[in-house]
Amino acid sequence: MIEETLIPKIGVVTDIRKDTPDVKTFRVVGTDGKKLFKHMPGQCAMVSIPGVGECMFSITSSPTNEEYMEFSIKKCGCVTEVIHALEVGAQITVRGPYGKNFPVEEDFKGKDLLFIAGGIGLAPLRSVINYVRHYRKNYGKVVIVYGARSKDDLVDIDEIQNEWVNEPNMEVYLTIDRPQEGWDGHVGFVPAYVKELGLDPNMTAVLCGPPIMIKFTLAGLLELGFEKSRVYTTLELRMKCGVGKCGRCNVGDKFVCKDGPVFRMTELDELPDEY
Amino acid sequence: MFKIAKERLNELYSKIAETFGLFIPIKKGGEVNYHVWGEGKEVSLETLKTVKSPKNAFFPQSENLMKFKTEGKNLEIIDVRWDKTEKPFVMFGVKACDYKAIEVLDKVFLADPVDTYYQSRREATTIVTLACSRPEESCFCNAFGIDATAPQGDVTTWLDGENLYWQANTQKGEALTAAVKELLTEGGEEKVEAQKASTKAIMEKLPFASLDLSRFKPENLNELFEDPAWESMSEACLGCGTCTFVCPTCQCFDIRDFKTNEGVIRYRCWDSCMYSDFTLMAHGNSRTTQMQRFRQRFMHKLVYYPSQNDGLYSCVGCGRCVNKCPQKLNIVKVIKTLGGKNND
Ligand SMILES: Cc1cc2nc3c(=O)[nH]c(=O)nc-3n(C[C@H](O)[C@H](O)[C@H](O)COP(=O)(O)OP(=O)(O)OC[C@H]3O[C@@H](n4cnc5c(N)ncnc54)[C@H](O)[C@@H]3O)c2cc1C
Ligand code: SF4
Ligand code: SF4
Ligand code: FES
């Protein structure tokens, strides 16, 4: 039988973690108990509940994890609602991996890396960060700035507080939008925090989050002296096929599913402003 | 080159239909479309613009992709691709523009990863093209360098008052020729040359004969995108999607699930970038105005697709959108407004 990318594989949900009031992380393996397929950080997969619909999600687990895949999914509509109602043992479908990954083996190698995430934007970054941690000696200093609406909206806070903060040569800065009981960390929006931190503009930066956060954070980075050619982000457009055929996710002459979702800021500058 | 007398075409169709499914322009309920040939059907080879383009044969308006069955917690995926063992088929009478359109679609569906649904039909098909001898006012294939008098395809045919002339171009074409050999006789070169010359003379006088596409180049992408003329050009657009459905190169599709008593069917169907929910997402929409959607359709045909495919335009000048838009909007107007200076 000839392989067809639109025909998914069956995945079994083996663990569900409630990260925030509206984000859950789902651990998925194949029916044989093994990982469904290999991927690289930043790549995505189409997850579906037959009869409900198919949606694109970043594979948030690291490629170095050889046992399973994880998706951090925010509840925001019909499909994600049903996914959130799943229980361990449920079967879903998964196809992928789709898209271009972060250049972890090329441009990122040997560099100091700055990761800036807002909200669910941590999902694609978690994969890169854990990849970098796994091959720690291949990369320089790592700085992570992560913000969310409140402390309850920080995705994967356990891993961040128990593992990331203890990692050598890695700094983690967390912030929430408004003061909150039980939070003694930084308060304020991500773009302002980034400027306050006075970061080294020679780092290679990766931004993921809501469009508004990206816009203001990028402006801040440029003020600090960062170069656009060393700033990366991911785009999110409506997708159906994932392979550049259904005609849905283009920005100018690029298909986000195939030519993205990872883009260098200088590449985005060349595209029409329609995302 | 071979020929067969016009009166004997039914014998030819009948012979082909012995071994192939034969799709040919047939008049039905006042419309001409590609249908399976059968004795007594009203064939209309001369119709240049079938309402639905031949793309429907390879990329049908709607097709099932797979089925799902659930038993308790267990999910099963049923591959429906080889449900029906399709016999090889022949598309007969494809015009030059529509043939080019199939090449345009090939670059999308046969690119890695290959779309196996499209591929299986494409491989099972022998395409017999027919040269145009009476191009219509809405035709502008020549603007895209398409020669309507000598289309490509597995077999090229020409039709005049007396005969159908036949020339095989590929292995598939040779095989089809062999299957109908007993009906063909040699000759016809001069008649074909004469027809080519007279058709070219008509083409030169067509109203859109001298469209200038020179500004539609990838390097002008942003400049064209920003052109203020999109606003006025798109003002009347209803977003009905007619232009996309009749277009032989429009490729956009949707994937949807449908619950039946025997499980879930996942199917795909044509979709249109002219629709407001085409790009709608949970957190917003990248194209909120009809102007943006209108711009997307024409930028894709004239700039984005060529940029991805070595300069090949994804409009073939068939003129269907020119005839069918209820608001008289079309790609010719776009080309005249934004194209090179020679359109004035
Ligand atoms: C490359 C990429 C990576 C993504 N990664 C993540 C992630 O890691 N975690 C996460 O929570 N979300 C992610 N998303 C967004 C996620 O796909 C949408 O939130 C989800 O599709 C919403 O579906 P819904 O049916 O619940 O919402 P509804 O609003 O009910 O959706 C209706 C339809 O719109 C489509 N749709 C809605 N929003 C989007 C969107 N943003 N992108 C694409 N299609 C959409 C759905 O396919 C669905 O068919 C990603 C999107 C893309 C394109
Ligand atoms: S855009 Fe119009 S003229 Fe061009 S191929 Fe499509 S329907 Fe034909
Ligand atoms: S251009 Fe014409 S045919 Fe196309 S969507 Fe607009 S009104 Fe309909
Ligand atoms: S999702 Fe189909 S083209 Fe990108």
Image: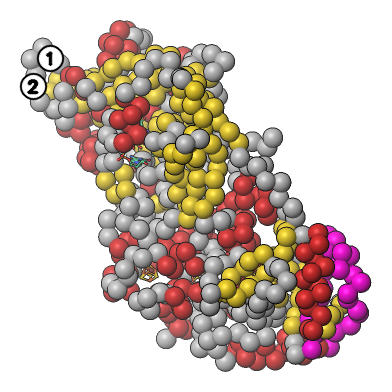
Say the numbered circle drawn on residue A183: 1
At 60% from the left and 85% from the top, the residue drawn is B135
Q: Chain of mark 2?
A: A
Say the numbered circle drawn on residue B268: none
Q: Is residue B338 left or right of residue A156?
A: right
Disc 2 marks which residue?
A179
Whether residue A105 can be seen here: no
Q: Which residues are magenta?
A: B162-190
At 54% from the left and 22% from the top, the residue drawn is A36
x and y percentages locating residue A154 in the rendered image: 24, 21
Q: Amino acid at mark 1?
A: Trp
Q: Residues within 10 Å of mark 2 (few under 14, many from 20)?
A: some
Query: Where A239 falls versus B92 (above or below)?
Result: above
CB-based contact (under 8 Å), mark 1 and mark 2? yes
Query: Where A130 falls versus B344 (above or below)?
Result: above
Q: Is residue A217 magenta?
A: no
Q: Amino acid at mark 2?
A: Pro
x and y percentages locating residue A52 in the rendered image: 39, 36
Which image quarter: residue A223?
Answer: top left
Q: Secondary structure at mark 2?
A: loop
At 61% from the left and 79% from the top, the residue drawn is B47
